[in-house]
Image (cartoon, helix red, strand yellow):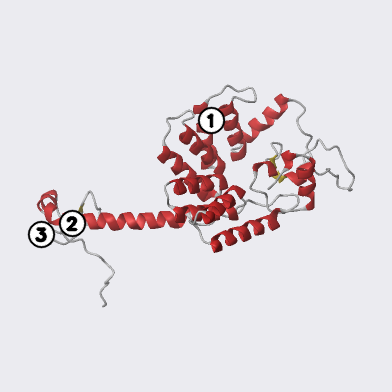
Amino acid sequence: MSLNTDVVVPVCANCGKEGDNVNNICNKCKVTTYCNAVCKKVHKKKHKKDCEEHVRLAAERAAKLHDEKLFKQPPPLEDCPICFLRLPSLQVGRRYQSCCGKTICSGCSYAPVYDNQGNEVDDEKCAFCRIPKPATNEEAEGRSKKRVEVEDPLAIHRLGCDYRNGESGLPQDYTKAIELFHRAGALGYAEAYTNIGFAYHYGEGVEADKRKAIYYYELAAVMGSTISRHNLGIEEENSSNYDRALKHYMIAVRGGYSNSLKEIQDLYSNGHAAKEDYMKALQSYQAYLCEIKSSQRDEAAAFDERYRYY
């Protein structure tokens, strides 16, 4: 019979006792074990140096894992359900439809709506589900309420914005707004966490707290928010952490955030980034434009600034 060498038997660091009863762990490093509190106390001075090393290594591992997650390129926005082109990251480049809960691009929102026979129909209908657009504010609010009730994160986020801004007939209520942003963020909507980050950054409805602002920016950035990603780059640049700032800006540029491209240009001009970095950023942004550009979207953008998509 072969012995199982993978089994680790706990050993008291002070007296050497072995066995499952050796389960009193150092409260600080969470690594070293003792058979009882007495052995832990007796061994405290001898353990101090090793304990500090365990804590240091644990902090390094945690920071490495954190950065691996933080600097991973998030997936792009989904495609427009009508033209099947990638949705632009710019907010005005896409439209949320409260009737069906779909988000369509500005080009498809602007384009004429056709029936199943190819005939142009009333352009006051949803381009996706063909339901007529709401005729009154009450009807619009009713549709939004239904989307909130079915846990639609975009609808919940929009309601949060209304409370934050005191719009759509609602009183300004920062507490209610942040509550709704948390709810939408937990359901997967990145910009909800961005808005919580803004609240802590500027002290809107909460006490200003830079650490909490960065925490929520990071949550949003990992989920795909280019605005939060850019904000993290700004924070790192202000702290002279130019390498980390460049990483954030690069990810934001790949996601279509043009302001980050300008920041990389400034880093290059000031000697904090290489020419190759700036060229790579330009190529990434051009690749993004190739994915989102269409004649229909261009036509909409030329008609009105509200349809601009890059």
Quadrant containing the N terminus is bottom left
Which residue appears at 80% of the width and 47% of the height?
299
**Taking 72 as reference, is 214 above or below it?**
above
The earlier-in-sequence mark between 1 and 2 is 2
- Helix, strand or loop for disc 1: helix
Q: Secondary structure at mark 3?
A: loop
- Disc 1 vs disc 3: Cβ atoms closer than 8 Å? no
How many other residues sit within 10 Å of disc 1, few (<14), some (14-19) or many (≥20)? many
Identify the residue at horizontal 12%, vertical 56% (top origin): 46
Dot 3 or dot 2, earlier in sequence = 3
Circle 1 or circle 3, nearest the eye: 1
Q: Residue at x 10, y 59 (%)?
A: 15
The circle drawn on residue 177 is 1
Q: Amino acid at mark 2?
A: Lys
SS label for mark 2: helix
Residue found at the very far bottom of the displayed protein? 1
Q: For residue 144, what is the image quadrant? A: top right
Within 10 Å of the Cα at label 2, are there few (<14), some (14-19), or many (20+) other Cα atoms? Answer: few
| Distance CA(mark 3)–CA(mark 2) | 18 Å
Residue 277, compared with residue 263, is above or below; it is: below
**Is residue 175 visible to us here?**
yes
Q: Residue 87, position in %: x, y?
A: 68, 50
Using the image as rendered, state which of residue 247 and residue 109 is in the foreground.
Answer: 247
Q: Residue at x 67, y 49 (%)?
A: 88
Give 16 or 81, whichever is nearer the viewer. 81
Residue 189 in view in this figure: no
* Residue found farthest to the front: 270
